[in-house]
Image (cartoon, grey):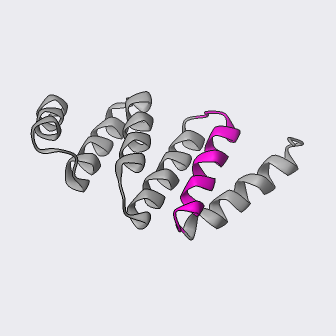
Amino acid sequence: AIAALLRCRARFGRSEETGDALARIYERTGRVDDLLSLLEVDAEADASGERKGLLHRRRGLALLAHGRPPGEAARALERAIEAGDEPAVSTLERLVDELARAGHD
């Protein structure tokens, strides 16, 4: 399924549908690095602020869920906020609060 979706994207270009399908497969199969890369590349390639913000927020949440550095997750959430993603604000606030309680600066 991954190969077919990648061929489709290579031939016809990126689409929300193929990106979302790949993300689901990567999540389900534990291909975290592929998921993170997909979300970053698609966010940067997407011109619409709403979708760009959503993809950056999803990347930030995936980074947190998979134990990646909190600073990297915070940067992804900041990019989501810059793209106008309102839910990323509360997510970033929770992350900052958790880091403060844990004694991280």
Q: Main secondary structure of the magenta part?
A: helix
Residue at point 66% right, 48% down?
74
> Where is 46 relative to 23, above or below?
below
Tag count in the figure? 0
Residue at point 11% right, 33% down?
4
> Where is 60 relative to 81, above or below?
above
Residue 25 on image: x %, y %: 27, 39
Magenta run includes residue 81:
yes
Closest to the observer, 36 or 24? 36
- Position of the C terminus by quadrant: top right
Residue at point 33% right, 38% down?
28
Query: Image quarter for residue 33?
Result: top left
Magenta run includes residue 53:
no
Residue 103 on image: x %, y %: 90, 42
Question: Left or right of 68: which side holds 49?
Answer: left
Question: From this viewpoint, which residue is outermost toward the front?
Answer: 47
Residue at point 37% right, 63% down?
48
- Position of the N terminus by quadrant: top left
**Which residues fall within the magenta stretch?**
67-85
Question: Left or right of 97: which side holds 28?
Answer: left
